[in-house]
Image (cartoon, helix red, strand yellow):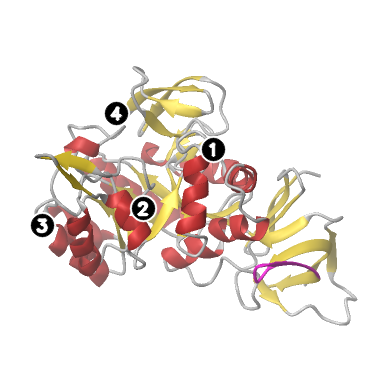
Amino acid sequence: MTIIRNGRVIYGGQIIDAEVAFENGKIVPAPADVSGAEIIDAAGQYVSAGFVDIHTHGGGDCDFLDNTEEAFFTAAKLHAQHGTTTLLPTATSGTPEETVGILGVIDRVAEAEHDGADMPGIHFEGPYFSPEQCGAQDPEKVRAPDPAEYEKVLSLSNRILRWSAAPELAGSDKFAAALREHGVLPAIGHSNAEYDEVVEALKAGFTHVTHLYSCCSTVHRRNAYRYAGIVEAAYLLDGLTVEIIADGVHLPPPLLQQVYRFIGPDRTALVTDSMRGAGMPNGESVLGSRETGLKVIIEDGVAKLPDRTAFAGSVATMDRLVKNMVQLAKATLTDAVKMATETPARIVGLTDRGTLDVGKRADIVLFDDEFRVSRTIVGGRTVYSKE
C-alpha cells in the first residue's frame, strides 16, 4: 500500500485535507494503521486525479500516425511529465494503410507497461469531414462516410473509443448507428452543419463536439437570412458535450470564459489537440505521419500552416490547459481540474478513472500553486517524479 500525505486533495468539487491511499493499482480507503505502507509526502501540493486527454496527436517529436510503438511510448511519456495519466492517441485523416496500422499499434501498446500515460483506445479524427471545414486536415483525404470502409475498420479492433465526423454528409446517420453498435462515441467535428442538422445529428447519436469553435460552423447568412451553426447548438442543446483547446491561442480568454460560464464544467472537456511539436522548440514540424503528413510551423505557442492561414494543432500539455482555465477563464481550480479529469473520462466512457473515489484506478497527479507537476502516478505506479 502507498499513502499520499500532507496534500491539498481535490475531491468532490472541494479542496480538502485528506490522505489518498492506493494498493494494487486501485484507490483504497486510507487505513488507520500505516505500518508497512510507503509514504509519499505531498508537502502541501495539490493531489488530483490524473488528467485525461481525449484528443492528442502526439508530442516529443512523435505523431501517433508514425505507427510505431516507440512513437506511442515517447508521446505518452512526454504527456505524463505534465500530469496526463490517460490519453487517446488521435489519428488525422490518413490513408487506409495508416488507419489500419494505428489499430495494430494500439492493440500492442494498450496492455504494455511503460513510463507514460495509459492509452486505452484511440480517436479517429476524420476522414469524413466537410471540405469547407477541413482546417489543417489534408483536403485530398476528406470524404463522405463509406460503409464498406468504416465497417471494416470497426471490425478490426475494439479499441476505437471515439470518431469525429461531419454529420451533414450523406450517410452520416448510418455511420453514427454503426459507431454506437460498436460502443464508439460519434463526435461532430470539422463540420459545416447548421443548427437544424445538429439537432438531427444529436438524435442520430452524435453527442459530442470536437474542439468547439475550431472548424465549426457558426451564425452565417444565406440569401439574407441568418442561420445558427454548431457553436450555437453547443450552447443550447443540453445533450451535447464539448471539448476546447484551452492553450490560450486557439481560443482567446473571452471565449474560454463564455464556454466555462454558459456550457460549464460538467459538459466541457479540456483537450490539448497537441501534435508532435508538444515539448519541442520552435521551428518546422509535421502534422500527421512523418512521411505523408502536412508541414507546419511551430511559433507563438501553437502549430500553424506554413502560410499562417490556420492553426495546425496545439503544442500544449494538460497542465497548461488547467492553468489557463484558472488564470484566463477565471474558473475555480476544482472546476478546471474537473474539466481535465472527471468530465473527459465520462464523455468517452472510461468509468474506472477520472476521480479519486475508492475503487477507481490509482491515476494521480501532484502539482504546486504554479501548476508545475512533480509526480505522476499511472495505475499505482510512479511514471514521473521531479525528484
Q: CA distance from mark 4 to mark 3?
A: 28 Å
Q: Is residue 73 visible?
A: yes
- Label 2, secondary structure: give it: strand
Residue 328 horizontal side relative to residue 18, left or right: left
Find out whether the residues at labels 4 and 2 contact each other: C-beta distance under 8 Å: no
- Label 3, secondary structure: give it: loop
Q: CA distance from mark 3 to mark 1?
A: 35 Å
Is residue 8 in the magenta section?
no
Find out whether the residues at labels 4 and 3 contact each other: C-beta distance under 8 Å: no
Q: Nearer the viewer, residue 173 or 268?
A: 268
Find out whether the residues at labels 2 and 1 contact each other: C-beta distance under 8 Å: no
Q: Quadrant of the C terminus?
A: top right
- Label 4, secondary structure: give it: loop
Q: Earlier in the sequence, mark 3 or mark 1?
A: 3
Circle 2 packing at 10 Å, graded few (<14), some (14-19), many (20+), is: many
Q: Nearer the viewer, mark 2 or mark 1?
A: 1
Residue occupied by mark 2? 123
Residue 180 image position (x, y, % from top left): 26, 69
Tell me the tag on residue 21: none
Q: Amino acid at mark 2?
A: His
Residue occupied by mark 1? 316
